[in-house]
Structure formats: C-alpha cells, structure tokens
Image: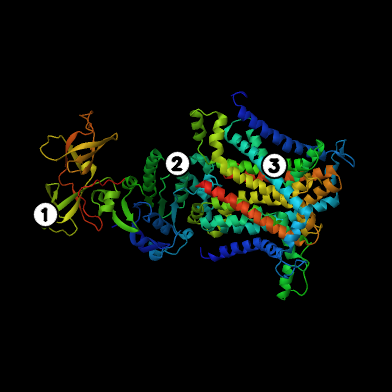
C-alpha cells in the first residue's frame, strides 16, 4: 500500500465569482511523480499555488502527513516550487540563488557551501556558480531554479509548467533530466502541464482537470486507453469518435453496431440498455487502412496525408462523409508506402480495441463527425 | 560604407544634430570649465591668468557653510521624497492596471502645471495669516500663528512638493517590473516578509531609488526660486549662489566652479545608477 | 493581503497633499479679497485685473510664441535625431546618446550658465533668439526619447519593405516612418511646449529686457508678498496645461490601439 504524503480534502477556491476549484479531493503518494493536466483555466495552477501556500483555499483542508498546513504561510511549508518563469533573483549569482533558502534556515556557512555545490553539480552547473542569471541560457536558468528548490530537501517539489518556456528539443532533454532527478532524490514531484504528451511520458499518475473538477485520475496508460469521459478522450491524444448503438446485452458482454459492423465487447462500467447510443472511441493508431478491394472494412478516400517521420498520418473521408484519422507506422519492407490524395481505400480497425463512452449531457452522439483535439 | 553622395539625408541629419549638440551643449560646458579657472574681471567678466582661486574660494568658511547647508536641505528633500515615494510607488504598483493609469495621470498633472505658480500656492497656505495657521487656530490647536513661511522647513516643503513626482516615477517603474513570482519564490524558500524585503525587494528596487535620488537631489540644489519665494532669500541653495555670482556679483569664475561641483555630483550619481543597473544585468542608457 | 485599505488610504492621502495647493489656488482666484487669505465672496476682478495688465498680457503672448517655436524646432530636430539613432550606424552614436542623456539629467542651472557664457562670448543679444536656442536645447532630449520609444516598438522590416519596393531613403522616411511616429511627434511637441512655457531657471539667465516672458513676469511678482492676479493667472495656466496634457495622453493612447 502506498503511503499518502499530501492530502487535499474538499478544496474549493473562488476568484471574483468564478469557481476555480470545486470540492476537490486528491491524495498524493510519497515518492510518486504526479501530473496535473488540463487546459488553461482548469485550476491546475491554482491547485499548485494552494499547496505552496501562495493562495488560501475558501474551503477544505490540506494535510501533510498528519499536519494540517491549510493556513501555514509558504515559508513554513516543507515543500518548494519551481516557477514557470524560473523566478531567479536577478541581483544574485547562481550560487547565492541556490544558497538563499539555506541562508534563511540559518545553516552554517560550510554546510551551505557543500550543499549548494552538490545541488549545482547535480544539475550540471558546477562551473556556473559565479554567473548571474541573465548570463545563462533558458535551459540553464531552469536548472538553477530546480537546484534552488531541491537544495532545501523538500518533502514535495511543485513544478508549475517548468518546461513551457523552452524550445522543443531542450524540453525533451529536460524531461529526461527531471525524471532522473526525481529517481535519484526520491522526492515527490507534483508537475503541472497542459501538454498531454509530456504528462503521459513523465508521470506515475496523471490527474486530468477541467473547470476545477477531477475528470480522471490514473496511470498514463489508463488515461490514454480507457478515458473516463469524452473530455479526457479528446484532451489526451487524437481521437476518432464514432456513433454506436448497443444490442444483445448480457451479464458480461454487449454487442455494438458501428457503421453496420457488429462487435462483441466486454460490458462497460456504465449502465447500458438495449438500443442505447454510445460513443465508440478509436485512436488513430487503432485504425487500419486497407486496399480498396479488401473483403471487409468501410470504403472511403484519402483527403489528407501528413508525413511524420516515423508514421504516416492520414485523413480519410468515408462514403457517408465521416472523417477518420489514421496513423500508421512505416513498414520496413515497403519503404515507398504512401497514399495519393483522392485514392480510394477501405478502413477497418483492430477487433476488440474499441472503447465505449456513454452519451453526456449536451454531447449527443454525433452522426459521425471528426473529433480530433490537439 | 556609403559615401555622403549616396546618403545625403543621413549626412544632413547627422550634421544638424551634431552641430546643435557641439555648439549648444559641449562648447558651453567647456566654456564653463574654462571660466571656472579664470580670474574675475569687473568689466569683461573674465580675464587671464588661469588659476584655481575660484575652487579655493569654495572652501571659504562663509561659502562652505552655504554649500553644506544647501546640501543638507537637498538631502532632507531627497530623504522626505524617498520616505513618501517608496511606499507610494509600492502601493501604486499593486492597484489594478486600469486604475494605475489614472493614478499616474493624476501624478503628472501637477508636473505639467507651472512650478512657480505651484510654489506660490504653497505661500497662500503657509503664510502667517494663511490657511494652515487659520485652520489650526480655529481648531484651537494653537493660540497664535506659527512662523511657517520663510523657514528652512518651508523651503524643504516647497522642494518636496515640486520634486516628489520625480522620485515616484522611477520607483514606480522598478516596482512595476518587480515580478510577483520572485517574491513568492523568496517566501517559498523560507524567507519571511522582513527577509524578503531586505534581501530581494530592496536590492531589486535600488536602481529606482538611485534614479529618484538623482532626479531629486540635483534639482533640489539648483531650484533657486523656491528659497526666493518661500525662504525669503535666507536658506540659500547652491542655485542661489550660482545665480547671484553670475547675475549680481559678477563673479563668474566662482559661479562656474560652483556649477562644476553640481556637474561632478551628477556624474557621480549617474555612475552609481549605472552600476546598480548593471548588477541586475540591465544595460544602462 | 490583510490590509488592503492601508495602501489605498496612503495613496489617497498623498494625492490630497499634492492637490490641496492647486485647489486653494483655483478657489482663491475667484476671491473678492485683496489680501487673499480669507474668503470675501465670489469675484472675477482678478481675471479682469490680469487682462488689464498690459505688461502681463505682452509677456503672455511672448511666452506663447516662444513655446510654439521652441516646441516646433525641437520636435523637428528631435525626430530627425531619433530616426538617425534608430536607423543608422555611425561613429559616436553612443556619445550622442550619452550627451542627450546628460542634457536631460543636468541641473537646469548648469545648462543655464553654460548657455549664458556662450551667448555672451559670441556676442548674441539676449532676447528671443537666445531663449529659443536655450529652450530647444533642453526640450530636445525629451522629444528624442518620446520618438525613440515609439520607434523601438515597431517592426524593423517596414523600412526595408519600403526600400525593397523602390522607395529612396528620403521617400521611405516621408511615406513610412513619419506617419508611424506621428503620435510620438505630437506628444513630444506638446511636452516641449509645456516645458518651455514652464521654464524659470534657464530663462532667468538667457532672457533680456527686450523680450519679457511669462514665468519671469510671475517670478518678479511673487517674490515678495501675495498678488491675487497670480491666482487667476495660475488657474488659467492650469486649465491650459490640463488641456494640453489630456490631448497628449489621448493621442498616445489612441495610437496604441
């Protein structure tokens, strides 16, 4: 059983009549890498600021172990923050920036020196101690910010979109670096991002937030393969949502009719009824594109193709107008594999990989629209 | 490099600007340096031989006292402006953006109003039977009018009144640049309010303080009309000394030397300001 | 923040202190009383006295004419300087920048005596011309920074695009740059106008009996005692400055959209 380190209980926060967080509960385990994921305005940054103590919740409690820290000021909380724009002190050297927190603890000089040097070595900035922040690149400033936060050996490190200001390549490097640091230090990381790819690749668990409410909490695999609702399905990864109709419901299985194709699947968690409309979710990589003369599949034609290096992504219009996104890996045996625009094809998918979601209020099952969110 | 013929416009502009600055800024200042080293002449203002008598005269006990007194009043003015302006700029930078614009507008309205007229308005308030004395007497706080006008205090009040916006604006600019995130980082790392103020806020606002000091201290030594109107020609400033030497006593070398003291003070303050900005990694002007 | 009212109260208090003298001045300009300390009833007599004072009216016109010409000349030179600083690379650019900065920061009195020394050396009769040269000199840096601020906010490729489309350097400046910096030119002009109208220190040194201007007229009046006409004059100047200031702010804000 994992031990809870930080427990958020019934947290609500209202800014000027706008409810940012609404009765949110969340347990963060000791030593895990947990990511708060959601679009801007979903409350993820507010949640982080509540943990750090920069904001006070209007309702609810925050427990660190057995201590209620709901009203403790930030300087008295044993957790530290890596800020989105680094927030380095521009008038201090790298060394003094990192030493700041230890000086506030009134540590002896030699201990400060040792620990700061260790922290800088850990982020590979040992030679930059005498520099000023403005003499460093964005990635280096980011490392200083991390060293400054971890040198205090916090129980919990809060990271507020720390990589959003970096370019793509540097971001990838820093993602790996952060994972390594987290493993080495054994500190719990709470990471905020709006980048679903980043969330999936780095986290032990992901919290998907929308309008201050947890949409889903689970491992990256659960979030991606078994989204709890339409929002998560659309927000995380690209998605085909097809209209389906349920029939032949038994104790453990159901049959779903998608475009006349009948598939028998495990009975889903939500309540089902005969003839009920459902969303059938298929990821682009579940889709198989076949020759036009294949003996099964739905016929359509290619309207867009995007070469992505490792995959070939295409958009296919079915005969009834439904758009289908497909993402196929290149086959080493067929290096010339490609489509012409307008080329007739047939579309199928891997049997049993369908994921069913119920209709939601205001989200009637469409007749077959393209639903691909970034 | 393109030649003059290829860029007649550029050449014309540069000649005009350089001409203006060389003739009306550089040359006159060199003249003042020259004048400060010449000998007083009742007829043609200046004559040879070159000497440093004027500078020596600055240390004449009589003038030294005036200088130190002027410096004291300017320093007091600066200090009062800083004490009023620092919390003011801080508070100003924390109100809503829309309201901030209005408040800054209100701050510079007086600056656009004739400074002589504003100094004169203070006289209405501070006079023996002026508004302040009348008000205090009718409240029964005092029995007879206080001597407010023609005092050192009146001069300082006048200087503060005229120069306060020049202290507030650069301070506001540094407070406005002060990122909330940096203050949060300080708290996050365990610093309380006082520690954050001493270790983060003060060093980061120092360039604004120095700019404000520069914009207040130097004019506070030169605004000769303030003591003339509010100080009754006592409590002289360096500006009064320079003016008297040039326009009345006709001792140009001495007036020029006094003005060079002001210039040196300015150079010193500008240097300090630049240094403080460089510490923050910003390029000085 | 626990005490939101504290900063607000403080701000309000300082604003009251800043505005009390101005309000007093305006109120007393309509006062019947000769002594000017106590309220004796509403009257426009000081405005009447002001306009019957021929020396005062003459000084007013002199000042306005001087401010108009100083603002115009400094705007032209200042704008050209800003354009040169922005667009060209030339030797001594840093020095030029530095000199403008020094002029702006210099105590006025230092500028005043240096100009007086120059004018006497070259034998220039103190009057309109000497005042104009002096006023343009101290207005210049303010115009330059106003225009520079505008120029630094706009896309460098605009002039390049104009040149690419066949405009000469001069044509490009006329057809692209000048329209872009127009709001800054107007704001700079208004600033120069106000600075010139307000100046006491420099004018004291470089004006002669042939050309008396308003601030010096006021100066000689207020040095001793109280002159109720000055209240009336101050009120008029205040209204005038306010109109100018609002105009310049309006121009700047409108141009930002």
C-alpha gap between disc 3 and disc 1: 89 Å
Q: Specify few, some or many for label 2: CA neighbours under 10 Å numbering under 14, 14-19, or 20 or more.
A: some
Q: Mark 3 points at which residue?
A: C136
Under circle 2, the secondary element is: helix
Residue C69 image position (x, y, % from top left)? 69, 43
Does residue B196 appear in this view?
no
Q: How crowded is mark 1: few (under 14 residues within 10 Å), some or many (20 or more)?
A: some
Residue ID for mark 2: A139
Chain hosting mark 1: A
Q: Residue at x 65, y 58 (%)?
A: B83
Label 3 crowding class (10 Å Cα cut-off): few <14, some 14-19, many 20+? many
Residues tagged 3 and 2 counted as in contact (Cβ below 8 A): no
- Identify the residue at image location x=41%, y=51%: A160
Q: Tell me the CA gap for discs 1 and 2.
A: 55 Å
The quadrant holding residue A314 is top left
- Name the element at disc 1: strand
* Residue at x 84% of width, y 43% of height: B252
Q: Mark 1 points at which residue?
A: A247
Q: Do labels 1 and 2 share a chain?
A: yes
User: Vertical placement of A32 versus B122: above or below?
Assistant: above
Q: Nearer the viewer, residue C218 or A1?
A: C218
- Closest to the camera, between mark 1 and mark 2, is 1
- Residue placed most toward the observer, B243 or A88: B243
Q: Residue furthest bottom?
A: B140
Disc 3 secondary structure class: helix
* Nearest to the observer: residue B120 or residue C110: B120
Quarter holding residue A62 = bottom left
How are the colours assigned in the image?
Answer: rainbow
Foreground disc of the pair 3, 2: 3
């Amino acid at each position: 059983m994992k031990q809870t380190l930080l427990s958020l209980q019934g947290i609500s926060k209202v800014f000027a009549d706008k409810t940012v967080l609404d009765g949110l509960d969340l347990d963060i385990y000791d030593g895990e890498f947990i990511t708060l994921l959601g679009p801007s305005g979903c409350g993820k940054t507010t949640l982080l600021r509540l943990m750090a103590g920069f904001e006070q919740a209007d309702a609810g409690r925050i427990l660190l172990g057995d201590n209620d820290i709901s009203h403790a000021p930030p300087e008295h909380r044993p957790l530290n923050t890596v800020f989105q724009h680094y927030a380095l002190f521009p008038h201090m050297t790298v060394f003094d920036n990192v030493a700041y927190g230890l000086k506030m603890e009134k540590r002896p000089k030699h201990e400060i020196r040792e620990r700061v040097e260790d922290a800088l070595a850990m982020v590979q900035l040992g030679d930059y101690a005498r520099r000023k922040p403005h003499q460093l690149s964005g990635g280096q400033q980011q490392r200083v910010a991390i060293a400054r936060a971890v040198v205090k050996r916090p129980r919990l490190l809060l990271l507020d979109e720390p990589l959003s200001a970096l370019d793509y390549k540097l971001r990838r490097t820093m993602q790996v670096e952060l994972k390594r640091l987290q493993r080495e230090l054994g500190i719990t990381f709470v990471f905020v991002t709006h980048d679903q790819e980043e969330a999936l690749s780095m986290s032990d668990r992901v919290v998907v937030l929308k309008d201050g409410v947890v949409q889903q909490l689970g491992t990256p695999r659960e979030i991606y393969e078994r989204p709890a609702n339409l929002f998560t399905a659309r927000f995380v990864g690209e998605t085909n949502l097809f209209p389906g109709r349920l029939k032949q419901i038994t104790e453990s299985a159901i049959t779903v009719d998608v475009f006349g194709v009948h598939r028998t699947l495990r009975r889903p968690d939500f309540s089902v009824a005969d003839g009920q409309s459902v969303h059938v979710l298929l990821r682009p990589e579940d889709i198989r594109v076949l020759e036009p003369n294949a003996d099964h599949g739905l016929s359509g034609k290619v309207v867009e193709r995007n070469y992505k290096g490792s995959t070939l992504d295409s958009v296919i219009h079915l005969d009834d107008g439904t758009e289908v996104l497909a993402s196929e890996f290149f086959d080493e045996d067929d290096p010339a594999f490609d489509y012409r625009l307008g080329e007739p094809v047939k579309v199928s998918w891997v049997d049993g990989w369908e994921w069913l979601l119920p209709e939601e209020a205001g989200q009637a099952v469409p007749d077959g629209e393209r639903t691909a969110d970034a | 490099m393109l030649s003059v013929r290829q860029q007649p416009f550029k050449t014309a502009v540069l000649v005009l600007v350089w001409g203006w600055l060389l003739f009306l800024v550089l040359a006159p200042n060199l003249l003042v340096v020259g004048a400060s080293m010449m000998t007083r002449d009742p007829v043609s203002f200046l004559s040879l031989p070159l000497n440093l008598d004027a500078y020596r005269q600055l240390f004449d006990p009589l003038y030294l006292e005036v200088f130190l007194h002027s410096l004291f009043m300017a320093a007091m003015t600066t200090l009062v402006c800083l004490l009023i302006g620092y919390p003011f700029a801080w508070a100003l930078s924390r109100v809503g953006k829309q309201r901030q614009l209005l408040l800054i507008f209100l701050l510079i309205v007086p600056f656009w109003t004739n400074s002589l007229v504003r100094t004169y308005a203070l006289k209405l308030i501070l006079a023996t039977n002026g508004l302040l004395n009348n008000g205090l007497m009718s409240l029964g706080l005092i029995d007879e009018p206080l001597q407010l006008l023609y005092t050192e205090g009146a001069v300082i009040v006048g200087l503060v009144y005229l120069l306060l916006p020049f202290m507030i604006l650069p301070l506001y600019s540094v407070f406005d640049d002060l990122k909330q995130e940096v203050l949060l980082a300080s708290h996050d790392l365990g610093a309380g309010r006082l520690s954050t103020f001493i270790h983060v806020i003060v060093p980061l606002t120092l360039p604004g303080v120095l700019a404000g000091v520069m914009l207040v201290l130097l004019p506070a030594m030169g605004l000769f009309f303030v003591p003339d109107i509010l100080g009754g020609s006592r409590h002289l400033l360096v500006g009064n000394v320079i003016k008297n030497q040039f326009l009345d006593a006709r001792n140009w070398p001495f007036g020029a030397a006094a003005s060079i003291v002001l210039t040196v003070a300015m150079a010193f303050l500008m240097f300090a300001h630049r240094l403080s900005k460089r510490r923050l990694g910003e390029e000085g002007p | 923040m626990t005490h939101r009212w504290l900063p607000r109260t403080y701000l309000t208090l300082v604003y009251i202190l800043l505005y009390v003298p101005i309000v007093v001045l305006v109120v007393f300009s309509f006062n019947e009383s000769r002594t000017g300390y106590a309220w004796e009833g509403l009257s426009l007599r000081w405005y009447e006295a002001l306009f019957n004072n021929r020396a005062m009216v003459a000084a007013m016109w002199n000042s306005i004419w001087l401010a108009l010409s100083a603002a115009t000349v400094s705007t032209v030179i200042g704008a050209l300087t800003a354009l040169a600083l922005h667009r060209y690379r030339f030797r001594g650019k840093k020095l030029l920048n530095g000199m403008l900065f020094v002029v702006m920061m210099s105590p006025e009195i230092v500028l005043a005596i240096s100009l007086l020394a120059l004018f006497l050396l070259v034998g220039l009769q103190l009057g309109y011309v000497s005042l104009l040269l002096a006023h343009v000199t101290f207005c210049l840096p303010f115009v330059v920074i106003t225009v520079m601020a505008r120029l630094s906010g706009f896309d460098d490729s605009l002039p390049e695009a104009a040149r690419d489309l066949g405009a000469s350097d001069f044509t490009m400046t006329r057809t692209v740059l000048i329209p872009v910096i127009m709001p800054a030119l107007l704001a700079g002009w208004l600033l120069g106008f106000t600075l010139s109208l307000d100046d006491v220190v420099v004018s004291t040194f470089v004006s002669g009996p042939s050309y008396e201007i308003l601030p010096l007229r006021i100066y000689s009046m207020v040095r001793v005692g109280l002159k109720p006409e000055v209240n009336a004059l101050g009120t008029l100047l205040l209204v005038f400055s306010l109109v100018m200031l609002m105009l310049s702010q309006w121009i700047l804000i409108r141009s930002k959209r």
